[in-house]
């Protein structure tokens, strides 16, 4: 069966995350909708997909990647068109490409890039309410930018690991951790972008939770640095809400898989 | 009773337009939600609001303006905060200011600015599906830009008037009618912005319908010009869908009412 690499975008608002949950079969997931659409395109034959990033409920994607074996060969443009004809409106296939037999969307990934968006205007535009966290309180952007540098490089992120993560190691390498101010029609805001070789569950949202604590003056970069080394996740600030987070792209050794 | 001018933003997706419809009292409208919120802030006293633009179902706003008489005086920031505490998440008050007794959101308006957004990428990002029309077919942007100039100045827009409009005159003056290409994360697109002293029902969407006919090669600017002069609305191309349209701002003689 030919293997494919699919690039996906979704509005995470209506999904209970990417991954099918064994305990909650009735929940609507990206994986569930995608597998149902692929089965429909293949006369009901079950198709299993693996996602590069197991995004949580409410988290969006501009360039999620999934791998799967399909019962038959497809021309790339035909597969994209056929998928989008049967996928729900909040989930789109942006691309489809043949992949090597050993390609696995998650295990083959060399890096992922996430973005977290914060609106700081007094009132948030309702058009943005599902895509950016609203923090009307003043935030110390400079202190947050300084603190963002703490996460760069090869680190043990045990302090930020969600409970119940059954990972072998909590060491990850971040090559980018950057906060910038933005100005859009709805007013000022902050965008945090982070890229690394992998992320623990809720790790990006925990980093942003730490940055927000610094921005509000509830913590300093020095405190975060200490807590990062302490490797005690109970003392880390709570993770930022899911809806501000977007999986921007997943990269592989054979070149980046951009959102289009 | 002190009169107020409210500036509003809304995600029009979940509304059946701005205006309360006598025939369909059960429908969810911006006016209905706003009047309910204002009544709640005043111990149940009924409050009537007038909107500057009677946006249709699915049309969004960044800077709609409404006028109303309130049972008591309010400090501006207090009124904004109180309103947003009781309004639904898809409708926000961006500003509130005392207004002269003869101020009327629609009748006092000197101009309104609307924007229509079109995504032309092969696949539209699902995050944008409620806010931009998706036209994956190639569009002749140059021809559309030329055609946009036809609508400038003082014109009789009878060809674009929706049936059932009970307006005294179909003459309106447009001071801006501009199409520009844009490039965003989801790919290329077009933005049409139009400003004028007033708009007939579905007039902006009808203009965009005409521009799309030109962009697809189904009409030329010369044909549109002829049809505009013919003043026969049955021959005009159909209006573009509502969800691409946003009321950007409403201006008054005492200065523009920006979205913030």
Image (cartoon, coloured by chain):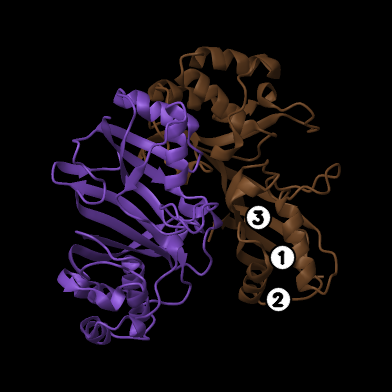
Chain colours: A purple, B brown
Q: Which residue has dot 3 on it?
A: B65
Residue A122 in the image: state x and y as whole percent: 51, 70
Residue drawn at 19 percent across, 48 percent down: A108
Residue drawn at 35 percent across, 43 percent down: A49
Categorize mark 3 by other alpha carbons within 10 Å: few (<14), some (14-19), many (20+).
Answer: many
Residue A72 shows in this picture: yes
Q: Above or below — where is A57 with respect to B154?
A: below
Specify the subunit that label 2 lies on: B
Q: Which residue has dot 2 on it?
A: B74
Residue drawn at 34 percent across, 85 percent down: A235
Labels in figure, total? 3
Categorize mark 2 by other alpha carbons within 10 Å: few (<14), some (14-19), many (20+).
Answer: some
Taking B225 as reference, is A179 left or right? left
Residue B221 or A92: which is nearer the viewer?
A92
Determine which quarter of the picture holds residue B182: top left
Specify the subunit that label 3 lies on: B
Q: Quick one: SS at disc 3? A: strand
Q: Are marks 1 and 2 on the same chain?
A: yes
Categorize mark 1 by other alpha carbons within 10 Å: few (<14), some (14-19), many (20+).
Answer: many
Mark nearer the N terminus (2 vs 3): 3
Residue B147 or A8: which is nearer the viewer?
A8
Mark nearer the N terminus (1 vs 3): 1
Residue B125 in the image: state x and y as whole percent: 42, 41
Quadrant that contains the C terminus of chain A: top left
Give the alpha-carbon distance from disc 2 to disc 3, as whole Å: 18 Å
**Residue B4, label in figure:** 1
Q: Quick one: SS at disc 1? A: strand
Give the alpha-carbon distance from disc 1 to disc 2, as whole Å: 9 Å
Mark nearer the N terminus (1 vs 2): 1
Residue A26 in the image: state x and y as whole percent: 55, 52
Give the alpha-carbon distance from disc 1 to disc 3, as whole Å: 10 Å
């Amino acid at each position: 069966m030919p293997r494919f690499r699919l690039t996906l975008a979704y509005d995470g608002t209506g999904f209970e995350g990417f991954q099918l949950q064994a305990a909650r079969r009735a929940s609507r997931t990206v994986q569930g909708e995608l597998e149902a659409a692929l089965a429909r395109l293949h006369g009901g034959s079950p198709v299993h997909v693996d996602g590069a990033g197991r995004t949580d409920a409410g988290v969006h994607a501009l360039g999620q990647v999934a791998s799967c074996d399909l019962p038959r060969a497809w021309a790339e443009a035909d597969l994209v068109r056929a998928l989008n004809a049967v996928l729900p409106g909040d989930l789109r296939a942006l691309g489809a490409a043949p992949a090597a037999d050993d390609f696995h969307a998650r295990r083959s990934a060399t890096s992922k890039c996430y973005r977290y968006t914060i609106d700081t205007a007094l009132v948030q535009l309702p058009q943005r309410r599902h895509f950016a966290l609203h923090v009307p309180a003043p935030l110390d952007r400079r202190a947050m930018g300084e603190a963002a540098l703490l996460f760069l490089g090869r680190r043990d992120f045990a302090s930020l690991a969600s409970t119940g993560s059954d990972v072998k190691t909590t060491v990850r390498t971040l090559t980018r951790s950057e906060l910038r101010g933005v100005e859009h029609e709805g007013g000022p805001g902050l965008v945090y972008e982070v890229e690394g070789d992998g992320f623990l569950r809720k790790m990006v949202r925990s980093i942003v939770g730490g940055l927000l604590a610094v921005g509000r003056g509830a913590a300093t970069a020095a405190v975060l640095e200490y807590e990062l080394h302490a490797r005690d996740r109970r003392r880390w600030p709570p993770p930022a809400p899911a809806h501000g987070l977007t999986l921007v792209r997943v990269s592989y050794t054979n070149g980046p898989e951009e959102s289009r």
